[in-house]
Structures are given as structure tokens and as C-alpha cells.
Image: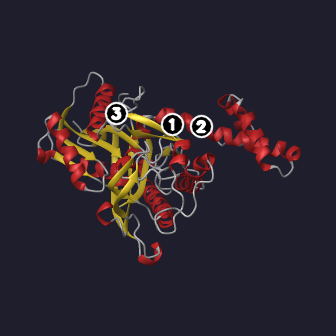
Amino acid sequence: MSRRPAFTTFASVDDPDGALFQVVDNQKIFDLQRPSDPADPHTLKHRFASVEAIERITGVHSRRILRPDKEPIDLARAAIHAWRTKMGNENPKIGALGVCHSMFELADAEELAQRIGREIDIGRDRIIALNTGCCGFVDLAMRGKKALEDLPSDEQVLLLNIETQSLQTDASDHATGALFADAATATSLRNGHGHTLLHAELKEVEIPSKARDGKPMFPVERRSATGYDGAVRPESQTILMNGEAVYRHGIELMEKALIDAIAYVSQQEAFADRTELVVPHQPSSTMVHALRDEYGKQGRGELLINLRNCANIISCTIPQILANLYGVMQHNKRDVLSEAIAKGLRKELRPSFGKDREALASAVDQRVQKMDVLAEEQNLLRAGLFRRPPFEPPAPGTIILFPAAGICPPKHETHMYSGFGVMEWNPVRG
């Protein structure tokens, strides 16, 4: 059997009956906001002006939050079940386990990983526990690949991303409450057939004091915090965010990770004529759209966005998209076609509305919502608005780049992580 590492199927916890998650919409986020308090340096100077402003600024319409009566182990069990279901009749032998659980203390990830290991009969010496944060999937891919080298050829490394940021964020905090959400995903690495892992790398990047205004990038405090259910958690360890510095350097590091991924692919002659697809970490609307604009200039392929009903789910963002790839691509197709149609309608209707931009926007939105947007694709292609049909399902052999950047938990005040991975898409199941 080939000794090349390959991902098997990707699975996510969908929870259609709401047994594990509660859905928190932007109305709830708006109601939970704290007023600005000059005595508290971590209250926002500017609240969200409206419910609509939350989605406009963050790109998030709703987010899923772990129910108060559930624990991370419940998500882990559900993720493993979802993965085994998608694997079908296969009964893979698991020789090692990797878990990314991005609570601030690594001990929390270690405790969860050991508990999962006991349930699926994996010894302590075969367990990898990480709290790498936004770059967690890249880190798991790297370490899973290394662990696979030490296993017999018929054994696999199970990789779980279990994220419950709601347990350590303040839902009333403007900078973090609207952005983050909870999720769980599962895949495995094996030798042989599957989505070949071609490369993965991760590095720490120091952010100079002057570049972050002398403040920590991600302050951590023990203080009372508001949960997404409105209940107050007294003396809770809470992660905050130096918003401006994180956004500024986050965009730079995401773009650098994407450029490095492109450079890696460009050096491989075998990939010269391959279709590319970018599945990036999704920190916020601002960052991911900046990344899409940068990538679009090169005309190499397409970049997927999946923020609206997922939010920033930390290390789960990339595997969550891969687990639901065809559906996410359909949503992205619908979005880009809708925007192309809306652009034409704005030009057509502007004379009728003069300077009343809000009325124009409302009229355009109403027209677009009534249209069968996907049915307009051929008309838009004939009009020359797209060079090729947008967001077509990836063919076997498509090269997928997955860049990421974010918090560096061991040095959370002064550093960020940046990294990327590259895989060859070869569906074998699911």
C-alpha cells in the first residue's frame, strides 16, 4: 500500500434537531451588548448601531452555541459518530488520535483528548492534544502526518476539531461576542487513497509592541462574563481581543499564508494545469473578503466563504467547509450571481431613486430575492460577467489550499500563528 498520507472523508456535527446546539441570532447578540463604560477598558467605545449592522460588519447572521447542559465530550462523540456514518461499511483501525480543543489552557485539551482516548481505546502515548486555535486544523494535519509515519500501514490517525469558544468568550463583548461560535468535525489520515495531504506548515509570528499599541493581542482575564443565554458566569476566564491590531495583522498573515501556499503549488510542475480552490480559515467578513479580493486578482481559482450561519468556529472552519463542500459551493455561487445581478439592477434603477440609497438598496434586494438566481447563470456568462461558470464542484485532482492565521495561545499577548496546507481532492466516500 502507498505510504502517502491522505484524508478520508470529512464529517461535521450537523445537529438538525438542536440537541447539542442552540442557534443565537443577531437580535440576541444586539440585546446582550453592554453599554460603553469609560471605567472599563474592554467595553467597546462603539456598540453595534443596529441588528442589521452586526451582519454587515461581521458577515455573521447566526451562530450555533453549545447548550448549557452539554459538554465538549458530547460534541466529540457526535463528531466520531458522524465520521463513522460517512465512512459507511468501512471499519477503520484507529492507531492514534489527534484533538484540537482551543480552550486557553492546554490542560483542557489534554483532558478532553484523554477522555476520548479511553472511550475509543487509544493509549496515552498515541494521543495528540492541541489548543492551537484558528490554525488548529493545519497543526493537526502536520502532527497527524508525523504520527502516521509511526503506525502500521493499515492503521489511521483520527483527527477531531472540537471547539467551544462560547465557554470562554463574553457574549456581551462587541469585539468577540458576535464573531465566535461552537462546532465539531472529524476526519482521519491514512496511507493510500483519499484526499492526499501534500504539505502543511505553521509558524509563530511576533507582533511588535508598537504595532499593537503596546497592548496584548489577546488579553485573558478572570472576571464575570455574560453567556449567550444571558446568564452571568462569575469569575470566568475570558479571552478578549485587541480588535484593531488583530484585524490588521490577521489580514496580513492570512494573505501571507495564501501567498506561501500559492508559491508552494507553483513550484510543483505536476500541478501546473490543475484547478485550484481556496478553503481558508474564516476569521471575519472583513478578513475573508480581503483575502478573496487578493486571490481574485490572480485569476487562479475561487475562494469559499462560509461565515453567515457558522461564524468563526476556530479550528473547525476549514474541515467544516470540506465536510459540506458541495453545499457551500452552491451558496457561494448563489451569492456571487446575486451580487452580479444586483450590480446591474442598481445601475438600472438608480435614476428612479436619486440620492435615496436606502430605498434603492431595498428595491434591488426585493427584486433579487424574487428571482431564481441560479437560473440566471447562463445569461450572466453570455453577458461576459464571468469568464467561466462560478463555483463548480471540484473534479478529482483539484488542488485545495487551506491558509489560516490567528491566536498563538502559548504567546497570546505578543504573537500570532500563520500557516497553510495543500491537499489534492480525490473523493473516495461521502
Image quadrant for the N terminus? top left
Q: Nearer the viewer, residue 228 or 368?
A: 228
Q: Position of residue 243 (x, y in %)?
A: 49, 63
Q: In the image, is 104 to the left or to the right of 49? A: left
Secondary element under disc 3, as helix, strand or loop, is: loop
In the rendered image, residue 348, in percent from the top left (x then y), is placed at 83, 42
Q: Residues within 10 Å of mark 2 (few under 14, many from 20)?
A: some
**Mark 1 or 2, nearer chain start:** 1
Number of the label disc, if any, that sits on residue 192: none
Compared to residue 218, the image places residue 268 above or below, namely above
**148 vs 207, nearest the viewer:** 207
Is residue 264 or residue 418 the one in the foreground? 418
For residue 142, side relative to residue 278 (left or right) = left
Is residue 62 in sight in this rendering?
A: yes
> Which three-letter amino acid code belongs to the residue tagged 3?
Thr
CB-based contact (under 8 Å), mark 1 and mark 3: no
Q: Which residue is mark 2?
A: 333
Q: Residues within 10 Å of mark 1 (few under 14, many from 20)?
A: some
Name the residue beneath numbered marker 3.
9
* Residue that sits furthest to the top in the current view: 89
Residue 126 is situated, as x and y percent measured from the top left of the image, at 15, 45
State the CA–CA distance, disc 2 to disc 3.
Answer: 23 Å
**Which of the two marks, 1 or 3, is nearer to us in this view?**
1
Q: Earlier in the sequence, mark 1 or mark 3?
A: 3
Where disc 1 sits, the SS reads helix
Judging by the rendered image, the residue that carries numbered circle 1 is 328
Going by the numbered disc 1, the residue's amino acid type is: Val
